[in-house]
Image (spheres, coloured by chain):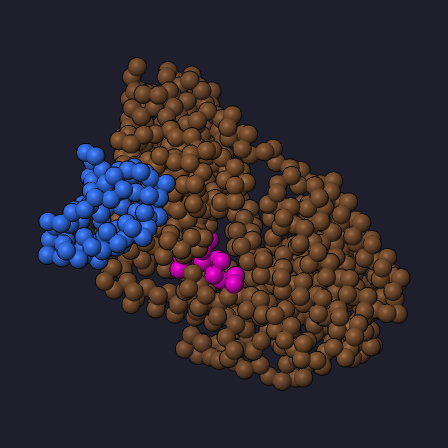
Amino acid sequence: MDYRKCAQEIFRHVGGRENLVSAAHCATRLRLVIADNGKLDMKALEDIDGVKGVFSNAGQLQLILGTGTVNKVYDEFLAVSGMTAATKEEVKAAAAARQPLPKRMVKALGDVFVPILPAIVASGLIMGLLEGLCKAFPALADSGTYTIFHLFSNAAFVFLPILVAVSAARVFGGNIFLGAVIGMIMIHTDLVNAWSVADYVANGTAIPSADVWFGLYDINLTGYQGHVIPVIIAVWIMCQIEKRLHKIVPEMLDLFVTPLVTVCVTGYLTLTIFGPVFSTVENWVLAGVQMLITIPFGIGAAIMGAIYPLTVVCGVHHMYNVIEAGMLSSVGLNTWMPIASAANFAQGAACLAVALRTRDRKTKALALPSAMSAALGITEPAIFGVNLRLVKPLVAGMIGGAAGSVVGAMFHIGATAYGVTGLFGFLTTTDYMIPYAIELAVSFAVAFAVSWFLHREAPQKEKGEQSAPQEQPALTCRPGVVYCPIEGAVIPLEEIPDATFAAGILGNGCGIQPAVGRVVAPFDGEITSVADSKHAIGMVSPDGMELLIHVGINTVEMEGEGFTLHCAEGDQVKAGQTLLEFDLDLIKKRGYPTTTAVLLANSEDLGTLTASTGAHAALEPILTVNACAQAN
Amino acid sequence: MKSFMYTITDPVGIHARPAGLLVKAAKAFAGTEITVTKGEKSAKATQLMKLMGLGIKGGDQITVTAQGPDEEAAAAAMEAFFKENL
């Protein structure tokens, strides 16, 4: 067949060069990312001689051409269209970029928040219990025990931006320590604590300010305690700056220039741009909600109960203490608290429904303690870890919150203090025990029921993957890059739970917490060694990277059980080719960690590496030899 | 040149971890070339991948040679290393 003619016709019917974002091919298909699917002539594409099928999937247009043909048509297609070759993951990334922005943002938020949940859940539970006990036994508040446990309970919240920043830096591929610095800047003790701003307002004290941008305007020197979103945005910006600088700054100067510029630019932008924007938004929200709750017949309360979690997500809920303090001093009753309590309790209930319904063990393990924590008034784990990511439980919680708030407004429930919600709210609503119980029951029942019925489990992902034909993706390997050999979460070398690996004795690299039991070749190269116990594979790339993939820790002791090899010493392999399959559950059952080490054995000769941590699909780039990356 | 023979006692042999430790120990003698031989195959003790590629198991007999200015000390250190770890 005439490859050139085939390529030309494809090119004509996809709407020309300006409608093409990128092109790649796998073993059988030409994969194109199209700007506007409306400009495609699907019928004409199907009729082209040589094209066996056309379909559009996950933002990609895929044309089935067949083995041996596709690469030739692809080459012609590049020539005809004037495009440069794209790797498969570039096509994937371009397709992902065409996912709606909110979806990508919510995913990033979850990726950042999930790793720090243990810290938040621990603190949340200690805080809930401690505050509750204190309200029940007031004498406790003066004891030394309280003072000490109070430290434990709020440390994670006081320094939350640092935890978030570190996690975000990992997800966005920046240096986690620079990320920590950004987080520290945002809650520096020289800034007024965000939780104290309410006191400043109440006392009429002026908040210290500083002039910025050469006296263009002043900013309030307030910190970001308890904030999540501004920290993530700041760290995202930091990572963009840092990565760009790594590319353009010569290696000799890299250590001097990159961190310095990154911290200065990010820090200044954060404090001078976010600061004013966020304090303005906070003031708007405050004014808005104060107006809202004056709407009679429980309508205002219902709206507020519904949107409450959204204000938590945006991190503008810190100012509510001002409202509560104002209510207590003017009428002696805090009618805001029942709204907050209904909203929080409902999020917990929605989360609990997810916990009980999901078949995914990971989600279950996450949702259960998060729901408990929410019942005690600490909702961050439930909102960020579960509900927001799945969206539907968040909505269910909002509906429940609205319902509960209406009950609260009908009974005119008022609290005698502020700071506690959820179950411990009973201690501050002693005059309204039964109405408060009804309110919580209503929020719980509504949120739980809605969440329960809205819950839809995506069909088991693995099954879908297995039934799909095993493609051998044609990946154009770049020198000095190791592509992800196992789908899973990439962790820094130091976090591999084994001293020998973590210390880098076997070489620098990273760890992977495998999500599936399949190892694919991380680059084109030769298999140099295969352990008799099948758990470790050595490879060398044409540009001299010696890579060791070591599945699990101490799995040598399994003597090959549960491991199935698909390659042998001396084989030439292509990136993406399956090398080894292993039984994840069996490894776990035998009590070995499944953490897989991906190490460059000759990293001493290769120089510094950059690892991209966080969740990765197979064949996404995870390790880059900096010297090679710069040479390109 | 100094050399010695050794029979591996650790049943799993030279897998990733001991290989890494061996490389580390061998790198301490920069100017001296240390070679591990099993049967017809041999590898420099500083090359992790080659070393693992030898597939040395418990019961295998290997020969370790050291050649260079520090060969006495290197051979002694290697012998001590194998006795302690393998």
Which residues are drawn in magenta?
Answer: A163-175
Give the quadrant of the N terminus of chain A: top left
> On the image, which quarter does residue A170 sit in?
bottom left
Residue at 54 percent across and 33 percent down: it is A462
Give how far across and how far down residue A72 sits, in percent: 29, 24
**Residue A363 among those drawn in magenta:** no
Give how far across and how far down residue A355 sits, in percent: 68, 46
Q: Is residue A510 left or right of residue A225?
A: left
Residue at 47 percent across and 33 percent down: it is A562
Q: Is residue A6 above or below residue A284?
A: above
Give how far across and how far down residue A616 sits, in percent: 45, 44
Q: Is residue A480 left or right of residue A142?
A: left
Residue at 40 percent across and 55 percent down: it is A499
Give how far across and how far down residue A502 sits, in percent: 39, 55
Residue at 28 percent across and 62 percent down: it is A254
Residue in front for this viewpoint, A287 or B84: B84
For the stretch drawn in magenta, the main secondary structure is helix
Q: Colour of chain B?
A: blue
Q: Is residue A171 above or below residue A458?
A: below
Chain in brown colour: A
Residue B36 visible in rendering: no
